[in-house]
Amino acid sequence: MHLPALPVLAATLVLGHGVLPATAAEEVEHYAAASSETLAEAIENLAAYNAKVEAVMARDDLGVQDMEEVHEYTYTMEQAVARIASEVEKIAVVLERVHLSSEGDNPHALRGATEVYLEMTAPLTE
């Protein structure tokens, strides 16, 4: 995974829905997305919904219903990717604190920053 691209991807996915305004004549149906309140929840949702999309894509012929099924799944997937991107940005800030603390002469600061970093990244490494 190329982490610096995640925030750009998330922004594109999230903002892409607002680029073309809907007119009164257009009724856009939106599906409810599964919640991705935490990094762990977002990763779980992404894995689960990727598997669902893979199952649809494995079908021999894709019809309108199949495409609508994938469309529905993308709402949860987009929220999950946006949450992951947001959390990775926060992790990068804390990692920089670890980096700078490791250059200094303050073991207490290094321990504190590293503890936070490891806790934040645990869902990515489990």
Image (cartoon, grey):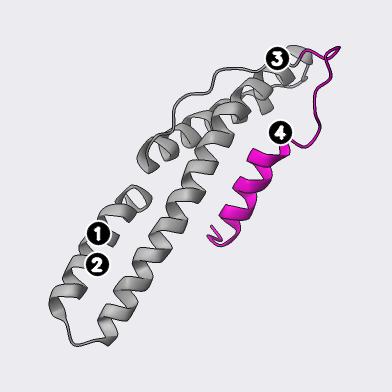
Q: Residue at x 33, y 77 (%)?
A: 99
Q: Residue at x 44, y 33 (%)?
A: 36
Q: Which of the marked residues, 2 or 4, is nearer the chain's N terminus? A: 4
Q: Residue at x 39, y 43 (%)?
A: 39
Q: Measured from the top left, where is residue 53 in percent x and y?
A: 61, 28
Q: Is residue 59 above or below residue 16?
A: above
- The residue indicated by pointer 2 is 113
What is the CA distance from the residue labelled 1 to the residue labelled 2? Answer: 5 Å
Amino acid residing under circle 2:
Ala
Q: Secondary structure at mark 1?
A: helix
Amino acid residing under circle 3:
Glu
| Residue bounds of the magenta highlight | 1-27
- The residue indicated by pointer 1 is 116
Q: Is residue 51 left or right of residue 71?
A: left
Q: Which of the marked residues, 2 or 3, is nearer the chain's N terminus? A: 3
At label 3, counting other C-alpha atoms closer than 10 Å, the crowd grade (few under 14, some 14-19, many 20 or more) is few
- The residue indicated by pointer 4 is 17
Contact flag, marks 2 and 4 (Cβ < 8 Å): no
Q: Is residue 84 above or below residue 71?
A: below
Q: Measured from the top left, where is residue 41 in percent x and y?
A: 38, 35
Q: Is residue 63 above or below residue 53?
A: above
What is the CA distance from the residue labelled 2 to the residue labelled 3? Answer: 44 Å
Q: Which mark is residue 29?
A: 3
